[in-house]
Structure formats: C-alpha cells, structure tokens
Amino acid sequence: MMILKDILYKVTINAVVGSTSIAVNKIEFDSRQIKTNDVFVAILGTVTDGHKYIEDVIKAGASAIICEALPETLEDDVTYIEVASSNQALAYMAANYYEHPSENLKLVGVTGTNGKTTVTSLLYQLFKKAGYKVGLLSTVKVMVDNATYRATHTTPDSLTINKYLKLMNEEGVEFCFMEASSHGIHQSRTEGLKFTGGIFTNLSHDHLDYHDTFAEYRDVKKAFFDGLPKDAFALSNMDDKNGLVMLQNTAAKKYTYALKNYADYRAQILENEFSGLLLKVNDSELWTRLIGSFNAYNILAIYGTAELMGLEKNEILRLISELENVSGRFQYFISDEKITAIVDYAHTPDALKNVLETINSIRTKNEELITVVGCGGDRDKSKRPKMAHIASVLSTKVIFTSDNPRSEVPEAIIEDMEKGVEPQNFKKTLSITDRKQAIKTACQMADAKDIILIAGKGHETYQEIKGERFDFDDYKIVRELLKQLQK
C-alpha cells in the first residue's frame, strides 16, 4: 500500500476532490483489472475513452480516480484528481509507485522509423557478451538479463515499463536498451524515466494513420531528445536530413554518426556480401555478419553508444564481430537447391527500398529476385502504392499478398497497392491473397541461385484477420515449403 499523495509527485493537477492522504493498493488504467482500494487512471485512448468506465470502477472498489474531466456525479468516499494529461499523470505515477527504477541503471532509448529493434537488440547482445547484466524493452521481446517476457507494444505502457525496470533493479541489471516509438513518446510513456542516452536512427514515411502530418511525426521524435537531461548523450544519424533537427534543442551532450557526412563516428563500406560487411569505422577495420548499408548505420549507432557508455574501443570491435542477426531482420538461409530466402520486417517504403537495394547490390543480376509483400490493414493507406511501386521497380518478380489485414478486406488492400505499379512493370506482378499460397508460389517460381524476399512481417509469428490472430511464421513457412519442393 502507498499513500496517494506520494504517487502524485510531479503530476500536473488541476483540481482535487477528496483526500490525497488515503492509502491505495495499485494503479490501473484497464477498468477490468480494478480491485478494492485501487487507483484508476482514465485514459483517452485511440480505441476507447477510460472516462466512460469511471462509474464501473467505483463499483469494483476503486478509491481514487485520475481523470482529465471530473464526472458530473461525485461519490463521497472516492477521491477525484483532475489532471492536465492522464497519460502524463500515469507515467509519473508509475515511476513514483515503482520507486524510480530507471535511476538505478543506465537506460538508453532508441527512436526512429527503422532500426530501433535491431539497434536495441544488438546493444543487448553486445553488453551481455561484455559480461554485464542487461535489460531489453523491444518490439520482439522484453529481456530481464537472461529471462524472456513477451512484448505486446513497441513501447509498453508506463506501468509495464516501470514494472520491468523494477524487476531489472532486483536482478542487478546495469544497462537497459529500450525502443521509444512515436506512439509511446506522444502518449507520454517515456516521461518520468531517467535516460542515460538517446539514439536517433532515421525518419521516413510511417504511422501517418496516427500522426496527422510528417512534421508532427518528426516533432514527436524530437520531443524525446528535447527531454533528455544534460548529463545524458544524444547520438544522431547525420546522413538523415532530420538528424540535426533531433539535436537542436537537447540539453544532452551531442554526438553524430554517418556514412556520407562528417561525424564523430564515421564508417566506410569496404565489402558488402551475403556473408557480411567489412567496414572501416573511424580508423579501424571491422567485420560483421550483418548485411547491407542500413546495417552499417546500425553498427555505427551501436559502436558509438558502446564507446559513450565506457567500453574500450578494441573490445567493442571484437564484440561487434561476434553479433548475430536479429530475428526477422534480414534473416536468410540458402536451401539445398541453392535458393536464397530472406525474411525481413520491412513494412515501410524506406525499409523495403533499403532491403531491396541491399540485395541488388550483392546479387550478380543473373538470378531472379522474387519479392512477396503486403501491407497492413487499418493502417496508413498512403504507403500502399509506394511500397508496391518500390517492389515492382527493384524486383524481377513481385507477388502482392496479405500482411495483417485486421478488419479490412485483403483484396481491397492489394488493390490499393496495385495503383502504385507503373504500366511497364505490370507484367512482373501477381496478386495472391492467401499469404502461404503466395510464399509457395514464389518458391515454385524460383530456380537455383534465385533470391526470394518475404517482406513485412519479419519476427511476427501470427497473422491478424478480422480481430483474430492465427499462427503464421514467414521464416518457418518458407523453410518448410522449400524443403517440400526439394523432395
């Protein structure tokens, strides 16, 4: 039990009705989880408004309500706190409730359109190999040193973040690497946390179903750096036109990385093959099993972060050479028939372009490059024709298929994609709604030395159709289908 006023520290309060000296049990923003003496935070979400459930949670035993608008009827034995922002209030309350766990470790946030999962996951790997206890909060999973927990959002809610950080404190974790999505930043989920550093990867077309404009999307990312303390570091990609924007108003120490421009951490690609990359980083050569120029940027971000956090240069170079690819990020294998299959999470125009350009820079052009790609339902529709255009220009054959249709009709999503295909590229394309059948067709079309790219879902092991999730793993499916075709 905690005293309500103690967990309201730093919350911007507009009005109080009742006592803040009451003892409360726990904080909840899900009305279904409320028990006696809990605090309910009414969040105005994208799907539903928590204010609708205030009456229900009081019946369930809530003793305090945190809301942006006081209800018309007030109960005598309930404390009501009207706040400027319920999301922000939840963030500070969660940090207070769990006793500010972010202050007891070195927390680094990674934001950008692409590369967040790769950078956080590889930093986790690197610091583990260096002998430290490490935490990870990513799209793919949550790691508390060696223990794995399932991730549900790119940036979890404030309560979940602080709960895991507290668990990390208890397990003696020294470093934690965390994805900071635009949704998470905009919904104040990263507030109330003490960051040791922040990394900016890049910015391209994404999430315009949530953010009204690209400028708003950019400014939300920038807000993360604006909030960094002066004893933190801010490491930004100078080859992205928004790299300097991120650093404009930050109080943190500013550092940069780049392949093309002058920067604190600079790399040159010496070799780029399916077996890996040979890079010259500042004045040292470095071999990594990761592939492509987009991974050269990820490696630079990791190298810079490790050095800024105190690791010795030669140790960093050795550890990077030992890093393994992240699940669903340019994950590939070569079948017995010498067909190369690549699975990648590329679900934005920029990410798809990067992956296809990387494959084209490595292949001899004597083989086919067959791309299987779809777009998610209930998401930004404007990127659908762009992704189809990129796939049809940079591949020799393309199969348009379902990604996660969610509540939309899959055929309608594919029709939106087809609008981006130029007339001269129509003959390259094929549309197959069923994703497994699309992958099977790509396998049947491929001959020895050909390359199949399956884009969009990467590490995801499900397909979401009409509110239901079905088991679906691109990597497992393409491996199995290529094995069957060899028989």
Image (tube, rainbow, N blue to C red):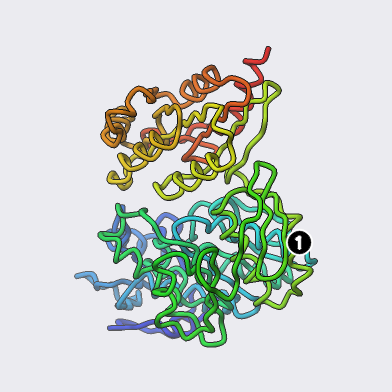
Residue ID at (52%, 56%): 115
Residue on which disc 1 sits: 319
Residue ID at (56%, 27%): 367
Of the pair 140 and 399, the residue shown nearer to us: 399
In the image, residue 196 sits, relative to residue 114, either above or below, namely: below
Q: Quadrant of residue 62?
A: bottom left
- Residue 315 x, y percent position in the rendering: 78, 68
In the image, residue 196 sits, relative to residue 276, either above or below, namely: below
* SS for dot 1: helix
Of the pair 63 and 204, the residue shown nearer to us: 204
Quadrant, the C terminus: top right
- The mark total stands at 1
In the image, residue 480 sits, relative to residue 297, either above or below, namely: above
Residue ID at (65%, 41%): 274
Q: Quadrant of residue 359?
A: top right
- Residue 99 x, y percent position in the rendering: 58, 79
Q: Amino acid at mark 1?
A: Leu
Dot 1 alpha-carbon crowd within 10 angstroms: few under 14, some 14 to 19, many 20 or more: some
Q: Is residue 149 left or right of residue 250?
A: right
Quadrant, the N terminus: bottom right
Is residue 404 at all visible to an observer of this figure? no
- Residue 478 x, y percent position in the rendering: 58, 27
- Residue 480 x, y percent position in the rendering: 63, 23
Of the pair 192 and 208, the residue shown nearer to us: 208
Residue most extreme to the left: 72
Is residue 322 at all visible to an observer of this figure? yes
Of the pair 145 and 181, the residue shown nearer to us: 181
